Amino acid sequence: MATVRLDQKRCALVRAVPDSYPRALAKFFGSGPTSVPRAQEQHQAYRQALIANGVEVTVLPADHDHPDCIFVEDQAVVIDDHVLLPVPGHPSRRGEQPPVADFLVRQLHGGRLCRMWGEAKMDGGDIVRLGDLFFVGRSERTNDAGIAELKLLLDHLNYELRVVDVPKHALHLTSISSTPTDTDLLIPEGYLRPEDFGDLPEGCRVHVMPEEEVYGCNTIGFPNGKVLVAEGYPTVLATIEALGLEPVVLDMSEIRAADGSLTCCSIFYSPPPWLLESE
Ligand code: GLY
């Protein structure tokens, strides 16, 4: 669920698939995308699934000079009405940020903008929110200086931050976990352990999936009880159903080929309250 609660998923920013997508970084789940048209079809189905679940979707044009540009989650961290612009962890991805930042600053009107600088590095894909508790992955893309800057913001907002070490065989914390609701956390055996997350608030539960379903642990839940899940992960599917939720299954094969997951392809946000009140 990345950095917003279920009730804050009013709007989402996504970015179209560039012609250069076959050159996207791929080191963990995939060995690189092979078909731009198929990736575009899957991305279109993803966008439709967001819309079908009540999300207002804006599509930024593709940036053909940046093969990874569809993975907008890494470029900005929206927490309530604040936007944190990280220094993306991979140098090839830093030029993706300006249009994403401009868009969010316009959408969140009077919201607060913070920008990382210096040695700090972070990909938004390393942050997971469980209700009002935040986890950040210390990973190949997110360093301690970046974590310290995120902590400053979360301290200001009165939210707790816990650090989880992402194993070397994974890209981001969100590549291997997600919160399909504000109280449920999915993690895979062989990558993460429940104790990595510490004692959770009352009512929160960790669901441990088989190691081979690691990719399926990335899901997107909505306030209507539906949950987007990637095709091909039966234990994840059964767990979502056992929680009384309704899975919506998407073919993510060309997104996975570039190490991307469901949450990587969107930034959720909610317009400021005064705009909602006038609806
Ligand atoms: N291909 C997604 C990333 O490596 O950032």
Image (cartoon, rainbow, N blue to C red):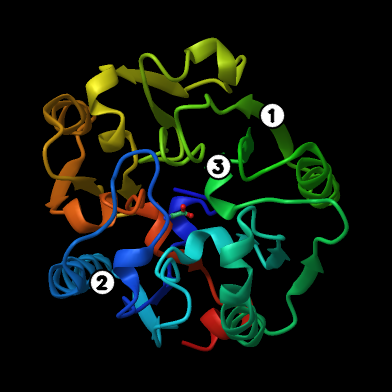
Mark 2–mark 1 distance (CA, rounded to whole Å): 31 Å
- Crowdedness of circle 1 by 10 Å Cα count: few (<14), some, many (20+)? some
Q: Is mark 1 within 8 Å of ligand 1?
A: no
* Residue 119 x %, y %: 85, 51
Mark 3–mark 2 distance (CA, rounded to whole Å): 22 Å
- Regarding mark 2 in the picture, which secondary structure is present there? helix
* Residue 232 x %, y %: 11, 37
Mark 1–mark 3 distance (CA, rounded to whole Å): 10 Å
- Report whether 217 appears left or right of 179: left
205 or 261, nearer to the observer: 261
Numbered badge on residue 162: 1
Query: Which image quarter has ligand 1?
Result: bottom left
- The residue type indicated by label 2 comes to Arg
Residue 45's quadrant in the figure?
Answer: bottom left
Counting every numbered tag in the picture gives: 3
Q: Earlier in the sequence, mark 3 or mark 2?
A: 2
113 or 191, nearer to the observer: 191
Residue at 25% over, 65% down: 53
Residue 170's quadrant in the figure?
Answer: top left
- Crowdedness of circle 2 by 10 Å Cα count: few (<14), some, many (20+)? many
Residue pointed to by mark 2: 47
Mark toward the viewer: 3 or 2: 2
> Do the residues bearing badges 1 and 3 touch, measured as CB atoms within 8 Å?
no
Please indicate, yes or no, whether residue 3 appears anywhere in the rendered image: no
Q: Which of marks 2 and 1 is nearer the N terminus?
A: 2
Q: Earlier in the sequence, mark 1 or mark 3?
A: 3
Q: Does the residue labelled 2 lie within 8 Å of ligand 1?
A: no
Residue pointed to by mark 3: 129
- Regarding mark 3 in the picture, which secondary structure is present there? strand
- The residue type indicated by label 3 comes to Arg
